[in-house]
Amino acid sequence: MALNRHGDARRVIVLLDANALMMPAQFGVDIFAELTGLLGSCEPATFPCVRAELAGISRGKGKDAAAARVGIALADRCTTIGDPFPDLPVDEQIARYAEASGCPVLTNDRGLRTILVRLGVPVIVMRKQKKLEILRG
């Protein structure tokens, strides 16, 4: 079990990438309720670089831009952890942090998911566009 930001094990930190924060708008799923149902007490967290990624997507047009705007609002419900490796790409920061901390990651990004599973990090993914499921690394 990963330690939360307070250094105790009462609440598991779950790291959310941009893809995860866009899921509610794209698929109508309440990721926070789903995470609680799956893990019990947990602390959703993200990085400033994820927020920046969402901001970039949100400046576009279409469904992804709209979903990114929703994702930015949802990121406000997450604990913000300072970018751990600011010189690295976002997915690599997520993978390195998750591997070092042991915290699960919520994502549907196939490339990131593959890396995380290879590293032995638990990955939470959406199945059938409505339920979250844990893939053990």
Image (cartoon, rainbow, N blue to C red):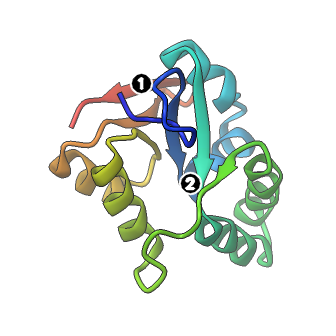
Callout 2: SS? helix
Q: Is residue 97 left or right of residue 66?
A: left
As displayed, is residue 61 above or below residue 76?
below
Give the residue type that dot 2 points to. Answer: Asn
Task: Give x and y (percent) for residue 116.
Answer: 27, 51
Q: Which mark is residue 16?
A: none
As displayed, is residue 9 above or below residue 84?
above
Instruction: Look at 67% across and 29% down and name the residue there.
Output: 32
Mark 2 residue crowding within 10 angstroms, few (<14) / some (14–19) / many (20+): many
Give the residue type that dot 1 points to. Answer: Glu
Instruction: Look at 59% across and 58% down and name the residue there.
Output: 81
Mark 1 residue crowding within 10 angstroms, few (<14) / some (14–19) / many (20+): some
Residue farthest to the front, as pictured: 7
Question: Which callout, 1 or 2, points at the residue further toward the start of the chain?
Answer: 2
Task: Give x and y (percent) for residue 15.
Answer: 51, 46
The number of discs equals 2
Q: Quadrant location of residue 37?
A: top right
User: Distance from label 1 to label 2 (Cα)?
Assistant: 15 Å
Instruction: Look at 65% across and 68% down and name the residue there.
Output: 48
Q: Which residue is mark 2?
A: 19
Quadrant location of the C terminus in the rendered image: top left
Q: Which residue is mark 1?
A: 133
